Amino acid sequence: MSEAEAKSPAQSHVRLSVMMNPAQANAGGNVHGGEIMKLVDEAGALSAMRHARAIVVTVAIDSMTFVEPVYVGNVVTVDAEVTYVGRTSIETRVLVTAEDPLTGTVVMTNHAFVVYVALDANGRPHPVPPLVATTPEEEQIMQEAAARQEYRKQQRIKNRPVLPSASR
């Protein structure tokens, strides 16, 4: 692929905002973590698709720690953008905030890095355009993302499951 086809992280940016309702919460009024995780995956996937202009599937979600609770009535905003691309893989950084619309208070609730693989029409891995930094900050973010991807590869090799032998 040529540099002319390369895309910047800003070109993949996605922002989703959703008001949290009682159906998304537990009896204590806290929004279920799974609801937030679903929004994280949706925003990350949209960002990756915007970059690749292809269908993507989730491969990995790095650690997701919930720093602050999200309550019914909060407006959850999920921002995602591409931070790394391989030949067919795409890492997105996803940041989640919750706003109390009555007070205007905004808190960072969690963040995650989500990895996707782009697919062609036959469901096979599909090459994606390169990612190009437009600022020194983006260059730093991309270098950190490349290190995370290398770590993921090493962990995949190290932790590859061994299937038990068939009993005779």
Image: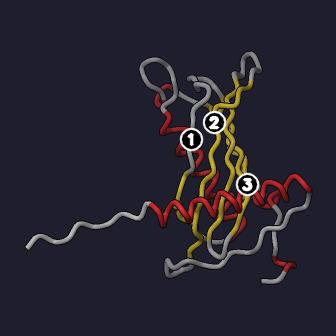
- Amino acid type at circle 2 is Asn
Q: Secondary structure at mark 3?
A: strand
Q: Residue at x 47, y 27 (%)?
A: 25
Q: Earlier in the sequence, mark 1 or mark 3?
A: 1
Indicate which disc residue 81 carries.
3
Q: Nearer the viewer, mark 3 or mark 2?
A: 2
Q: Residue at x 48, y 39 (%)?
A: 34
Give the image location of residue 67, x and y in percent. 61, 29
- Which of the numbered marks, if any, corresponds to residue 75? none
SS class, disc 2: strand
Given contact means CB atoms under 8 Å apart, are the residues at marks 3 and 2 in contact? no
Mark-to-mark CA distance, 1 and 3: 17 Å
Residue hosting label 1: 64
The image quarter containing residue 5 is: bottom right
Give how far apart the Cα atoms at labels 3 and 2 are: 15 Å
Q: Which residue is mark 2?
A: 110
Dot 1 lies on which element? loop
Q: Are marks 2 and 1 in contact (CB under 8 Å)?
A: yes
| Labels 1 and 3 touching (C-beta < 8 A) | no
Measuring from the top left, give residue 101's x and y in whole percent.
72, 22
Image depth: mark 1 or mark 3 in front: 1
Q: Nearer the viewer, residue 104 or 160?
A: 160
Q: Is residue 8 left or right of residue 30?
A: right
